[in-house]
Amino acid sequence: MHGDFAYDMFLRNDNAKSSPQLEVMVWAGYTSQPIGSLQTSKAITVNGVAYDLWYGNNSAAGYFVYSFVPNGQKKTTLPSGSSSVDMMKFFNYLKGKANFNISMYLDVVEAGCEVSFGGGTISSTGYSCTAN
């Protein structure tokens, strides 16, 4: 089984609780390729992990996506593990970038695994989110 684990934050320019206008993804592990193209290698280091910045338009969903993926850590399969990160570090990095504004509304937060191909079982526990 091949898959990805990521935190997904969907943002909007207003509080309409409607379709996302921007997605920011922070990948803890991955076997596939993020949407768009690699823009900056080792763009930011958080908790000792250097993240590459990918971005592009998710035309199927209708919004732009920023993806932070661990540099040089693409795997053929995902092992077990855990991840805990301060998302504000990624949001602060995006200040001044196209399609992002620090005053955007955080509409939806998701975390989890998605199978990119193959078969198997995924078990996950312990998701939490604290907003300040």
Image (spheres, helix red, strand yellow):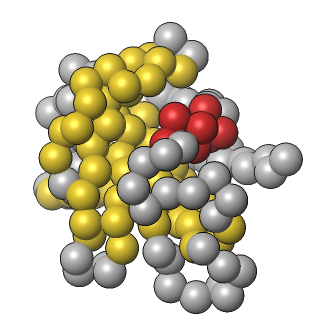
For the residue pair 3 and 9, the one nearer the viewer reads as: 9
In the image, residue 67 lies at what x, y percent? 36, 46
Residue at horizontal 68 percent and vertical 67 percent from the top: 105
Q: How many marks?
A: 0
For the residue pair 122 and 37, the one nearer the viewer reads as: 37
For the residue pair 3 and 91, the one nearer the viewer reads as: 91
Residue 120 seen in render: no
Q: Which quarter of the figure has residue 73?
A: top left
Q: Which quarter of the figure has residue 68?
A: top left
Residue at horizontal 19 percent and vertical 54 percent from the top: 36
Residue closest to the far right: 132
Q: Is residue 110 above or below residue 81?
A: below
Residue at horizontal 50 percent and vertical 77 percent from the top: 20
Q: Is residue 104 above or below residue 45?
A: below
In the image, residue 98 lies at what x, y percent? 39, 56
Question: As drawn, is 69 to the left or to the right of 111?
Answer: left
In the image, residue 3 lies at what x, y percent? 27, 48
For the residue pair 129 and 112, the one nearer the viewer reads as: 129
Question: As drawn, is 1 to the left or to the right of 107?
Answer: left
Residue 81 seen in render: yes
Question: As drawn, is 62 to the left or to the right of 6?
Answer: left
Residue at horizontal 32 percent and vertical 20 percent from the top: 42
Residue closest to the far top: 48
Q: Is residue 15 above or below residue 93?
A: below
Q: Which quarter of the figure has residue 52?
A: top left
In the image, residue 104 lies at what x, y percent? 64, 64
